Image: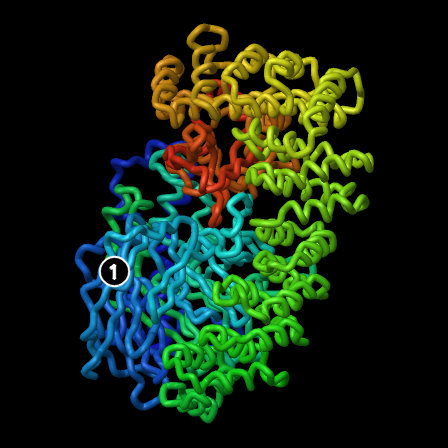
Amino acid sequence: MVNSLYAKLAAVAALLLVVTGRFASTSWGADATSVDSVDRDYSADLPRIPALSPTEAPQSFEVELGFALEQAAVEPEVTDPVALDFDEHGRLFVVEMLGYSENAKEMLGRVRLLEDADHDGRFERSTIYADGLGWPTAILCYDGGVFVAAAPEIWYFKDVDGDGQADVRKVAFTGFGTHNVQGLLNSFRWGLDNRIHVAVSSCGADLRRGNQPDSEPLVLRGRNFSFDPRTLAARAESGASQHGYFIDPLGREFTCNNSNHIQQIVSDDADLSRNAYLQAPSPLRSIAVEGPTADVFRVSPVEPWREIRTRLRAKGIVPGIVEGGGRPAGYFTSATGVTIYTGDAWPAEYRGNAFIGDVGSNLVHRKTLASQPDDVALVARRATPGREFVASKDIWFRPVQFANGPDGNLYILDMYREVIEHPDSLPPVIKKHLDLTSGRDKGRLYRVIRADRTAEQQREQFHRRLPGDATTAELVAMLAHPNGWHWTTAARLLYQRHDPAAADELRKLLDDHNAPIEGRVLALYGLQSAGELDAPALIETLADAAPQLREQAARLAGCWLRDAANAESKSRSGVEQALISLADDPELNVRYRAAFALGDCQDAARMAALAKIVKRDAANADMQVAVLSSLSHGAESLLHELVADNEYAATPAGRAFLAEVARQIGARGDQRELASLAADVMAARQRKQPIANEILVAALRGAGGQAAEVRRQLSSRTEAIEPLIGELVAAALQQAVAADPDVAARVAAINQLSMGAFDAVAPTLGELIAPDQPQEVQSAALAALGQFSEGEISKPIVAAWRGMSPALRLQGAELLLSRAATAAALVAAVEGGQLTSRDLDPSTIQRLKTHADAAVRERAAKAFAASASTRSEVLAAYSQALELEGNLDHGRELFRKHCAVCHRREGYGTEVGADLATVLTRTPEALLVNVLDPNREVDPKFIQYNIVTVDGLTHSGVVSAETASTVTLTGAEKATQTVPRADIDVMESTGLSLMPEGFEREIDPQGIADLIAYLRSEL
């Protein structure tokens, strides 16, 4: 058997060697372009790769030393498994996605019930539990049935009569997107809060209850969601998972996407959404030290179709992203199923490790996770240099998901397909030779075990006590079980049964300082879910010796304080005081959660606590966000406390934070807050603090279109404010134009000019954007002009345009394009001959052509029509660059002039566009296409969006972050605009890359050759 398998693998390898050898002879040779074509028949180059039988497959694996794989189920008992869940009796429910990747309408998907009747670890009994589904992707057991994701619905199935087939079929939720087979909802997880948490993925949702199709939807874009399985109450959650999401025993959330193999979600949507004026960054944090698209070490040969596609893309023959620098493999391209091992069958050092599949490379990757004293996020590191935890020589091995099992081992779901790829990513010239359904009749479930497991250990694992028939007291005891599956299932059953008798047992476990921390945390949340978490228990837990428990208690304290039932509680002050005391906690993560929870306190002392946290953790950006989120009310009190601290207010971190608080106050426009700010400004002036003027300017800037009203409010509260503004503007006018070598002082003065009347300051600002001024001064003058709503701001900008540097032109374009009137003025300057199309960079022209205002779009299309060329014409004209010898030094100059606004190399430029880390291995052909035809196929991460606000401003860029309350767009020079969702009138995609077409107007073929030489050079 083994000899025949090796012969089979050798034959496949030899076949691929012949094919890839043919590739090598034509890949980049002189005749390659004439050989490769969309009209060529590639059938001879795309041989079918035979599958390995279930008995042959295990020999194809390389498994980490000390471990082995065993089959729990194989076809025909299971086919195309993509998700599974064990019920409390050890029965295994498996989601089968037979319709992948193009056959959703055939409704081939189903749920299979597997049973291991003889407890030997092999599931020999198989029943179709439910069928008739399109693309099912997730499952979770509850109350004798299962919730199943099958977009656009989440179903609930239940077998009532005991025949192993579902009799109940109900739509719990509907409205999930289906336009991308690799962006469907997935990964149901039971949370600490006893809710089912769901990865919504890129298709998003307009979520409604199944029985309420006409209700107002919960819009989910860039966010996950959770629901109460008992009531179906749903809420948005932080995160933007693609396929893979996991909650560890301490409530830390992890996710992944194709090219970012492990991320952590560091903040909660419910906390961020409290403050409508918070400009919060994305809650997602990439935590792998090796980077998002880290190298992987596959042992399987690269599929011929992947080799051919990469070659055709690099040459520009077919559209598509040339990833990995033109390499078809060797890095994460299809990361999926991130799962934390919580079992008890492996050595202790593996507990808490993360496991991620890469289905395109036929492997399972392992990461160790560790905390950092100065960061709220963990750090993930490759566990084994140069090799993977599991890797197969068989290209059919597709590890799409993982699960912790009742036996304490990790299970691998192997979809076992000949081809796993998004059908739209396969060029027709290749796709017609592939069978995307090949393997629909196959599938394997593997169990990863210790290689030294004894027969007695095996017997114990498959005969251990399960929670299904446990009493309430026994279930509570199982919360402290050494196996993660047991404690999670016990928590679910306790919530499901809702037995009042559980409360006393949960309190005993919570108070047991010798119990495992995981069990004590679950006891805490069990009490909270049952409505039995009283103030004394919460106060005591907030002071517990275990920091993990204090952290979770702080989270729940915020929920307790937010509950309307506790608004008038006599115990409220005790809870608030316990929270306030956490400002001095030695653990960063405890202070972090306390900073969020303090936002729900009423006690005035909360501001002193927040101030203490801000000053202690001044360098921690996450902590600053947590504090700012807690300022939905009382921002003026924190400002007052911190401004009074001269030492803190004079530090760079302090000045930046205070300016942000003042900005929020100005944006909110609350009379009481503005009155307090005005008083603080005057008091700081008396103390001769520079921060006084800065917070006044920040408040007026934050007011945006309401600046005049905010100014009036400030002046009405403190009479001295208006004369002060007049004095500041007068002094600023003098300082701004002074022949002073202190550029920073001039910039600070220019920032204050936006407080003046437009007619009074516009002439000076126009002079300050002249080319004889330092660039910092010009930039500040442009920003100051942008604070005015008058359409006349376009006149000085257009007049100075030709003397501006490329970076300043981008800034000026951002300003002018933010309003329809000023965008039209820029087009008019081209129409009237004041400017030419060559005076505008390609990105500005593209943005004018895709502007949110229809009239601007139409005029721009006509104004720039003469300069347009088809991309194929441009590529043909510039193909000669591939034959020219490049000059590295000149290429560096060109990069810094034209590319550094969105890319970074040698420490120069900004990182907005695609990462250039892999550019050394990218082919010249690939780079030529990337530069001159950037819209051939756009990576969704770099699609340009337009946002129009309710006051008529337009912002443009890639969506770099979304939270409950804001959307952040990032453009050239890494300029960001964070827009409150409440201010968004329209948000729409242009469908185009942030990198514009038209680069050929800026550079000739020799320049392209020089640029390519620089980009591919080893520096």
Between 275 and 255, the one lying in front of the other is 275
Between 981 and 413, the one lying in front of the other is 981
Q: Residue furthest top?
A: 833
Q: Residue furthest bottom?
A: 456
Q: Residues within 10 Å of mark 1 (few under 14, many from 20)?
A: some
Quadrant of residue 764 in the image? top right
Q: Is residue 185 above or below residue 669?
A: below
Task: Name the residue tied to disc 1.
Answer: 210
Residue 301 in view, yes or no: no
- Image-based side of 892 in relation to 429, left or right: right
Q: Which residue is rendered at x = 50% and y = 59% of the image?
A: 297
Quadrant of residue 1011 in the image? top right
Q: Which residue is rendered at x = 61% and y = 68% of the image?
A: 575
**Residue 1007 position within the rendered picture, expressed as x and y whole percent measured from the top left:** 54, 22
* Secondary structure state at the residue bearing disc 1: loop
Q: Is residue 887 above or below residue 290?
A: above
Q: Which residue is rendered at x = 57% and y = 74% of the image?
A: 535
**Residue 353 position within the rendered picture, expressed as x and y whole percent measured from the top left:** 54, 69
**Residue 21 position within the rendered picture, expressed as x and y whole percent measured from the top left:** 39, 48
- Quarter in which the N terminus is drawn: bottom left
Residue 93 in view, yes or no: yes
Q: Is residue 147 above or below residue 896?
A: below
Amino acid of disc 1: Gly
Between 639 and 67, the one lying in front of the other is 639
Between 100 and 521, the one lying in front of the other is 521
- Quarter in which the C terminus is drawn: top right
- Image-based side of 459 in relation to 525, left or right: left
**Residue 165 position within the rendered picture, expressed as x and y whole percent measured from the top left:** 20, 77
Quadrant of residue 520 in the image? bottom right
Count of marks, rendered view = 1
